[in-house]
Amino acid sequence: MSTVVDDLATKVGAERCTVQETADKIPTIWVPREEIQSVLRFLKDEASTPYELLFDVSAIDERTRQHRVDQPDSDFTVFYHLISLSGNNDIRIKVPLSEADNRVKSVSSIYPVANWYEREAFDMFGIDFEDHPNLRRILTPPLWEGHPLRKEHPARATEMDPFTMTPEFQKAQQDALKFVPEEWGMNTDAKHTDFMFLNLGPNHPSVHGVFRIALQLDGEVIVQAVPDIGYHHRAQEKMSERQTWHTYIPYTDRVDYLGGVINNFPYVMNVENMAGMKVPERAQVIRVMLVELFRIASHLLFYGTFAQDVGQMSPVFYMFADRERLFSIIEAITGGRMHPSWFRIGGVCQDLPDGWDAMVLDFCNYLPKRLDHYEKMAMQNGILQRRTKGIGAYNTAEGLEWGITGPSLRATGSDWDLRKKRPYSMYDQFDFEIPMATNGDTYDRCRVRVDEIRESLKIIRQCAENMPSGPYKADHRLATPPAKERTMQDIETLIHHFLNVSWGPVIPPGESSTIVEARTGWNSYYSISDGGTMSYRTRIRSPSFPALQQIPVISNGFMVSDLIAIVASIDFVMADVDR
Amino acid sequence: MEFPPNIWSYVLILPIAVGMLVTALILVWWERRLLGWWQDRKGPNRVWPWAGGFGQAIADAVKLLAKDDWVPPFGDRLFFVLAPAIVAGSMLMAYVVVPWAPRESGLIITDSNIAVLWFLAMSSLAVYGVLLAGFASNNKYALLGGLRAAAQMVTYEVFMALSLMGVVILAGSFSLLDIVEDQAELWNIGPQFVGFVIFLLAGLAETHRLPFDLPEAEHELTGGFHTEYSGMKFGLIMAAEYLGLIITSAMIVLLFFGGWLLPPALQSLVPTGLASALVGLGVFAAKIIVFINFFILLRAAIPRPRYDQLMSLGWKILLPLSLVNVLGTGAWMLWTG
């Protein structure tokens, strides 16, 4: 791994790059901005283990940050997180920019997936990516003023003047939203053909939320599909800068509202990593069990809506009935259903209730029979197969090019499941398989997810049968909420308890990112602590965001009905895309 | 056909038209209950629990009637208003030739020597309504739905007609009374099984219900040709769908399952006179209900094929098959004289 750093140093010049220490041990190298294209090209093509996946690109507003040990001067930092699947390692490249001149070359010609990430960084920070094919706002409305993730941008309505909507303002906003095909890269005239422009969404039964796809149609054949996102943007990343490390946990639940505690997982692990906390085994296994329960809940919903989107009416009702059973278990354990916010820094909220294992095992015995039934009903149905096989296919390399991870990547024949490749939270202690498929088409994406339900059941059964005893929260001063047993006995504990509950834990300065295998791909939280009670910057990398960017590539030339099947197979929710 | 038709025909028009509309209303509720039962849920059971929740259908009808009668200002007002009437009207007209009970009972508005053709003509007219609804809405989703409807109907009408020709050859008549009476020894489902399968598929496509609901396809086209419709105009389109369901089931029973006849072995047990009419009516209704339930089951079970897949199934498989069926039946009739 360090060889890559050495190679880079020789390539760029050792005196021009800086190596930074981070809590996650990912090599982090600062390079000058004029070198970014050559560095990324080197990492992609020439490095000893090529970095196939540009995992994340975003920026940091460094202007008010206090603790910047061994880092070069920078007002705005653009970071690139790359992953090499062949070498199973990561590298993070950082580029320092000044406030006056925050231009950097776009890398979308090297990694196509960078296109939207750079647009997001432009939208949120005003970073000027040179030679970007389409540098427009992506999450905020076209006439938004300012760049929300800059520190000077207000985070709350109370920091701004009251909002008023004048007729002129309204007209300007509406005019800016007017659909002009040319602005979307669509040509209106072709020889012998009149195209039809169809606005699929943001309000449409099959786009799974407020997602808009502008379609250029020739008859019913899609000439061009251009996705448009941002309708569900809630500034989750900005909110993290105004919430304590602890009180941000419920926000993470709502990033991907089908994932429930799966979203808590990378966040709390990341904070624990920065705090240097070791989570007790029982808490780790409880977390795994809850995460897998939620994975099943999400995959069941996917299964049902997938069948529904190709026109099969009944399956979704059966799957909702199963999901209801599952939520009753989750409710018994956590007290919540879809958003239990149940993980804590250092463990989980409470110990498991009496009788939980009987409920869980009961469900493990119940579901496989139902799955056999659904297999006959949906997956083996000839019409469903004809609707989905060979539709929207891509191979592993193309998938990685567009940042596809998780089940959708495994549908192309890749075996990359983080639970196996980079076991966290004791996943290496469990016996389960990684379901794969080979064609990478719409049907296979469903196939993999359906098979994953059975594997998750295996894991849950093992959790229920081998649950370790012990505490459910780490015995650490930063674990929240802190242990209360001795609070009233000695003053030291009382002080810690008081501070940790009223202010929240103070996480030592540093940076860390943690990736988990979320329900539909890799979900990562990259947090920066400036030694305060709140995060200085939290970057949420969601798996759905790049998947939507890929839609045009895999759907052009197909029919509208196929697009619906493709969209269904991606398994996204817009809350997760827009954050 | 006698002309002018006797007074009895006029008397029957109103009860049959009203009866069919009421049946359509019942079917809306029945379908929802049945789907609920098959899908692990309740369905509408709260309004009038003593009637199994049937009050829901009436409440829905009242709601549709009471709704604001909105016509899209960007659409074509005349045809927008006309379209649902054409759809529902032509569907109702098809019932004119349906014999509900044996010939002696006179439970038929008019027996015609072109009854089968009349049914085909009326169901084709209904397509114009769908088409006009799609075009007059001036909505892109409705337009796509209308286009799909046009293509689908044109395709399926061709061999719907052809699939019936075998039956017509066997009976030697287009009159539905003659066709049913011709089945006294053997129901047509035996010799005309291929014709039955093709007619079943074509009938499904004609009524554009799932799995062949491509003109509506709410997952793709939000509402298809009736996206812009609301209130009772939508109600009429929906009623027409159920009227189509009933007439298609009725035609299947008349053409292939012996109409009001009991199975040949039992037919001799039927008494004569008024009782024969009642028994015939009951048998006919029971058979229709079986097929209606079958269509509802199909809706619950099968996904929707893609538009081009439906077309290629029609042109490449069903059309040649129905031609072969006509040819084979004709050859058989010539052979046996």
Image (cartoon, rainbow, N blue to C red):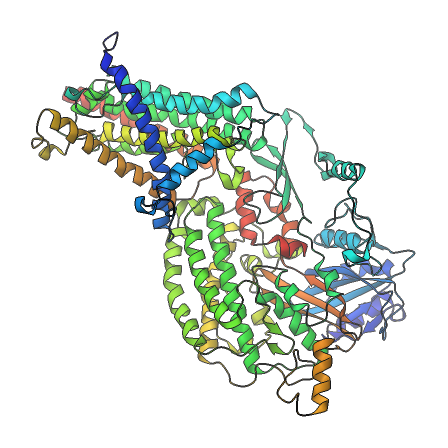
User: At which x and y percent is residue A256?
Assistant: 61, 59
Q: In the rendered view, tell whether residue A189 sits above or below residue A84.
A: above
Q: Is residue A231 left or right of residue B134?
A: right
Q: Residue furthest bottom?
A: A490
Q: Residue at x 49, y 24 (%)?
A: B131
Which is more toward the observer, B133 or A533? Answer: A533
- Quadrant for the C terminus of chain A in the image: bottom right
Q: In the rendered view, tell whether residue A544 sits above or below residue B286.
A: below
Q: Is there any visible trace of residue A386 in the rendered image? A: yes
Q: Residue furthest right?
A: A100
Which is more toward the observer, B46 or A33? Answer: B46
Q: In the rendered view, tell whether residue A355 sits above or below residue A310.
A: below
Q: Is residue B155 left or right of residue A182?
A: left
- Quadrant for the N terminus of chain A in the image: bottom right
Q: Residue furthest top?
A: B3
Q: In the rendered view, tell whether residue A435 sits above or below residue B165.
A: below
Total marks shown come to: 0
Q: Is residue B137 left or right of residue A42?
A: left
Q: Is there any visible trace of residue B323 in the rendered image? A: no
User: At which x and y percent is residue B260?
Assistant: 19, 29
- The image quadrant that residue B335 belongs to is top left
Q: Residue at x 63, y 84 (%)?
A: A483
Q: Residue at x 30, y 40 (%)?
A: B293
User: At which x and y percent is residue B112?
Assistant: 25, 15
User: At which x and y percent is residue A214?
Assistant: 65, 39
Which is more toward the observer, A51 or A273? Answer: A273
- The image quadrant that residue B143 belongs to is top right
- The image quadrant that residue B248 belongs to is top left
